[in-house]
Image (spheres, rainbow, N blue to C red):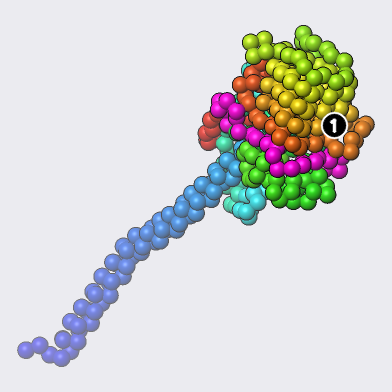
Amino acid sequence: MISRGCKTSVLASQRGTALLLVVMVTALLFPLLFSGVRHSSLNLQMSSNLKLGDTALQVADTGIHHALAVIPSGGNFTYTSTTPIVSASHPTLTGYSYSVTAINTAGDTQAILTSTATGPNSVQKVVTAYISRGTYGLGATSLAGSTAAATETNFSGTAFTINGTDGCGAAPAVPGIAVTDPALQTEITNSTTSDGGLASNQMSLVTGTGSSPSVTVVSPMSQTVSQMADAFLARTHTVLEGGNYSSGSWGTAAEPRITRIDGNAQLTGTIEGYGVLIVDGVLDLAGNFTFNGLVIARGDIQVQVTGNAGINGSLMLGESLTYDPQVELDVRGNATIRFNSCNLSSADAWVSLPKVAKLVAWHEKLN
């Protein structure tokens, strides 16, 4: 028979053994528990960093597209240093920003953009993009360098057409009217005719890329309109004096030519031309005048397109620095101005027309 004292001693011994086992098991499990908590914390941190990195990569891509929008339309690229061409905070993502530099490749026909994005917790992503020249950086009508304060337009009736859809279907659509000043875009599209803009029933007559009407703000060209005209005139061309012309043929589809009118000109009757027409003076297009190619008006310009006159290619107006006509561009009657890339091909062969920058490829730059 076991006495009560012996039982108490055995129970105490068993409790001590159990406590020791609990302590030992706890000691063994604690590092595993700590490791699990630490691993979970690391997973959360990795997940957070991954999310920040993915967002920064998107911000770097935003920088590339921002840069594409501000690169002037032109021929070859002219970047010879790595000075940033755009630097900005992201418009909607707090704490994120990007900076984009550009450098030419050999031959200057391509350029390399490097977009560096930074975000919270010092996260950083770098994207390298390769760009080249794409389609024409022209509108059916281009008011390059013109500002709302110095430019007045007029649109009369509901029978005229300004169309940026390619007439030969070989290139993407361009703006019906391309401007470089946002205030001028507003002036033309605000349904207020007192400032020379389109009336509400004329909006659908200007078509092309963008909204209706197709009046789009584009980046400036790398050359002025006058510089481009001079480049054409450095080649063989025909010079006509200012005056009234009612018949004739200024180039053909098989033999396009560069024609310059030195002075004010009124073109009526039946005249057809191909190639490039440069007018240094007031230009009045009426009757059945049709020109297939590029028309450049510069200097103390005033262009009026009326009657059944048509331009199948592109009309480009250069702002005068010394003279502001009452109406710089006046379109009325059954006049038609339509973008046509095929009719611009001869002009582009003589002098490289301004072309927009396009993205060829991009990749993330890994450290």
User: Which of the 4 image quarters holds residue 147?
Assistant: top right
Asked whether the viewer can see residue 14, the reply is yes
290 left or right of 123 in image: right
Locate the N terminus by quadrant: bottom left
Q: Is residue 167 magenta?
A: yes
Q: Residue at x 32, y 63 (%)?
A: 29
At x 63%, y 10%, the residue is 254
Please, is residue 104 above or below residue 186 in the view? above
User: Is residue 131 something that shows in the picture?
Assistant: no
* Picture coordinates of residue 170, whole percent (x, y): 56, 25
Residue 303, image quadrant? top right
Q: Which residue corresponds to the image point at 71% horizontal and 13% vertical from the top-left?
A: 251
Q: Amino acid at mark 1?
A: Gln
User: Percent x, y for residue 52?
Assistant: 53, 50
- Between 179 and 342, the one lying in front of the other is 342
Q: Secondary structure at mark 1?
A: strand
Other residues around mark 1 within 10 Å, as few (<14) / some (14–19) / many (≥20): many
- State the predominant SS element of the stretch in magenta: loop
**Quadrant the C terminus occupies:** top right
Boundaries of the magenta span? 147-172
Query: Furthest-bottom residue in view?
Result: 4
Q: Which residue position holds label 1?
A: 302
Q: Can you give x and y, in whole percent of width and height, for residue 256 in the image?
A: 69, 13
Residue at 64%, 21% (x, y): give it: 343
Does the magenta segment cover residue 323? no
Residue 321 spot, x, y in % from top left: 90, 31
Q: Is residue 42 left or right of residue 142?
A: left
